[in-house]
Amino acid sequence: MPEQPPITGAEYDRLREIRENTTNWRQWGPYLSERQWGTVREDYSANGDAWNNFTHDQARSRAYRWGEDGIGGFSDDAGRLCLALALWNGKDPILKERLFGLTNSEGNHGEDVKEIYYYLDATPTHSYLKMLYKYPQAAFPYGQLIEVNRQRSKLEHEYELIDTGVLNENRYFDVFIEYAKASAEDILMRVTLTNKGPETAPVWVIPQLWFRNNWSWSEGEARPVLALTNPQCVNLDCPDPYIGSYHFYYEDSTTPLFTQNETNTPRLYGTPDTGGYYKDAFHEYVIAGNQTVVNPSGTGTKLGVLHQTSVGPGQSATFRVRLSKNPQQEAFADFDSVFSARIKEADEFYHQIQTGITCEDEKNVQRQAFAGMIWSKQSYHYDISRWLKGDPTQPAPPKERLTGRNSNWFHFHSSEVLSMPDKWEYPWFASWDLAFHMLPFSIIDPTFAKDQLRLLTKVYYQHPNGQIPAYEWNFSDVNPPVHAWAAFRTYQIDRKYNGGTGDVKFLEEIFHKLLINFTWWVNRKDEKGDNIFEGGFLGLDNIGAFDRSAPLPPGYNLNQTDGTSWMAMYCLNLMQIALELARFNSVYEETAIKFFEHFLYIARAMSGEGEHNADLWNEEDQFFYDVVHRDDGQTIPVRLRSLVGLTPLFAVMVLPADLHEKFPNFAEHMEWFLNHKPKMANLVSRWTVCGKGERRLLSLLRGHRMKALLRRMLDETEFLSDYGIRALSRYHLDHPFRMNLDGPDLCVKYLPGESDSGLFGGNSNWRGPIWMPMNYLLIESLQKFHYYYGDDFTIECPTGSGVYMTILEVADEITKRLKRIFLKDEKGRRPVYGLYPQMQDDPAFRDYVPFHEYFDGDSGRGVGASHQTGWTGLIAKLMQPRVDIAGEFPCLSKEELEKLTRTSKDPKK
């Protein structure tokens, strides 16, 4: 298989400078949130009602405490100085400064952004960025979106902006926002508006530059200053030496407006108006025509440069600004040439990344997926100790906060750039989301990927007890333990990126922190010490009949198949890391054997042969289930065919044939253990065959159970959709699952798209849709199984079709179906746009691709958070040609590699 040639060029050189700490090309980037209001950080209520404590209506007038938001926002990595775009069409009731969406109680399926925008391009150093925002020329239908969605039931689709009719006759502006860097501290912003409608339309364009308010929370904090120096330049002076002085340039026919980034207390709280300048001044100036609200002296902490124009049908207008550390004699002389150079360099970078991809549409989708990953970085600030206790100059928070959300995470202090699931619906990190994000990031920027994974194990993130914080709404909840998997996969991809040299220091550092986390899991989630894990939430929000994070009724407890399977996978991941480290330090072989043994104890418990029979495998149904245990000894299998029962496939590893040669101590201990634990020996395939080049399989599944699970998974009447693997078997469409645990009847029915359940706010839905991360793990697991079984092992795919495939071909088939969600079909349509013909057929929409949170299990249309590139960005990794097999299996010979990548086409095999 051909090796991908080394990446070269200007963007690679910038990445190398970051890696070598010579130039901080990432100091500036797309680090602004799209929604700071309604977050936990800004919630100072007694009851934890973040959505109503800080609303969208308040956002334009109330200074944020912990972050900032804006349209197409750009900032330094500390989030101190921010640049973003504001717009007005002459009809909106408010200035369009931030993206609008529904709160959790307003949407019929929970919170949801109600704007149309796309991330189109980005380089990993942010040397070039491009996004598109579609801005209606009619008044934005804020009230209509709220009221119609409130009236809709959970059985109906969400009411979207395109449903309101404001985009009819193409009466909107395409607003392209681009950034280019002339140097690491010289940022160019270009805004291009195109009138897509049939008539000339007015528009007010206001690039805004402001300092995050860091001075209102403590006495004596120095305040930064923006000051007009000449008609086309504003100087910035920040007391923080990290920012220091900058210069902001704009062109003629522009009106500079100054105010303070301060809360408008008269508007919000009815306090006396003392004549101050407030955060919402530009709203009052532009819409109400009140010129007294801006500072005539030309100073402040917030600046807006106002352009007013009209754009004819089909015509465009361009607006340019520049923020530079060094003074510019002619700020716009080289402006367009810098953009041209950066765009060319971005094309060269991705041309090399996409070597081997022949389909132009696939290249377009992958590049936009990468762009979404990069645009979704955010400067994230959250000091829980101070958040709980309050600020010296502000009213003390209610005492209930000290026993409420995240109150036992006093140590937590974040002030870094983090990869977010989505910067509107989920503008806060989630640990397992972030782990999945790093796989596509590893392809384009492995240094960033390693830094992000390392970050969550730092002492100011990881709890002293070893737990990794789950997500902002509840750090103490439990996400699947995929950090070790992501760390080793990132290490492997980075090793290939660096010509075969792995970052052992990174792997060793993160391994030691994960040992602490593993101990937390064992101590906290294996309640009976029987190697069966409860886990709780584990990300699978609505997949069950009840909330697994909440206690069951008295007298009941739950054994979780997925919790136990995740821990088996965790054991194998840590064992794999330990063996890799043992290549450089043999002491790690002892640690590897510890995880080898622990995996076998878990496998034995799941098989039903342990001291405590878990009964997770149901022989009648040939499937794994959660099991409810009663205090009287009765067991009740939760016979719900879902992803829970497929997670045992994730725990698989193949030991190399030359184990004795590479790891003699590990091999010796392994054989001693298996000789003295003969029942355990049956869980390791071919372990007694020595000197014949045989590899050994570690898996929760022997051949029979694996085949049984695959038959279910590949059945198109159950899990296999045209667009990937469903979260719930379609069998439950006509056969809903029901159970009762001394309370109300519980029911789960297959739902391909939106949820009809109120669990976790009702917006999270595992009852049918296709989720990219789970599909991705299934694909990787199948590839590992094929590495062990080879081409001689085939299975019918789809079940009942009469077509037989190797396991590798099955993995490729699922990959093809997942890619089908985003790619044009034979009619030129993308399933992701299922409900909207305009988006399918209109050239102004059809080649812009959203990356939703999940996808309809029957049609492939996008569902959930509409711009959550996050883990759905894994599609970029799946679209990457499989050229890294040698890096993942370094023990293979050339002949074995060729066999592994060869596919069988004989349906009789």
Image (tube, helix red, strand yellow):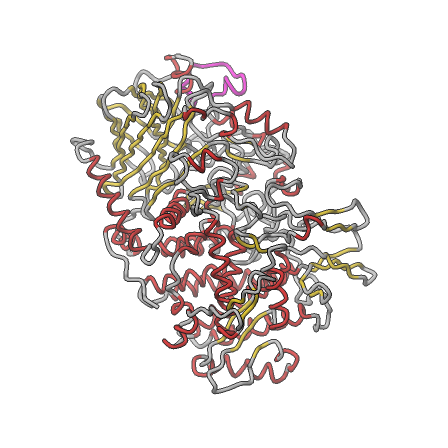
In the rendered image, residue 595, in percent from the top left (x then y), is placed at: 55, 71
Q: From this view, report whether residue 603 is shown above or below residue 485.
A: below
Q: Is residue 524 visible?
A: no
Q: Farthest right residue?
A: 632
Please provide the residue range marked out in magenta: 264-281
In the rendered image, residue 108, in percent from the top left (x then y), is placed at: 61, 33
Classify residue 222 as left or right of residue 432.
left
Q: From this view, report whether residue 405 is shown above or below residue 447.
A: above
Taking the magenta stretch, the answer to whether it contains residue 643 is: no
Q: Nearer the viewer, residue 402 or 327?
A: 327
Quadrant position of the N terminus in the picture: bottom left
* Majority secondary structure in the magenta region: loop
Residue 157 sits in which quadrant?
top right
In the rendered image, residue 887, in percent from the top left (x then y), is placed at: 39, 68
Q: Nearer the viewer, residue 707 or 491?
A: 707
Classify residue 396 as left or right of residue 545.
left
Q: Nearer the viewer, residue 593 or 118?
A: 118
In the rendered image, residue 307, in percent from the top left (x then y), is placed at: 31, 21
Residue 633 sits in which quadrant?
bottom right
Query: Exactly how many numbered labels are in the figure?
Result: 0
- At 70% across and 73% down in the image, what residue appears? 609
Q: Is residue 678 visible?
A: yes
Q: From this view, report whether residue 341 is shown above or below residue 709.
A: above
Taking the magenta stretch, the answer to whether it contains residue 280 is: yes
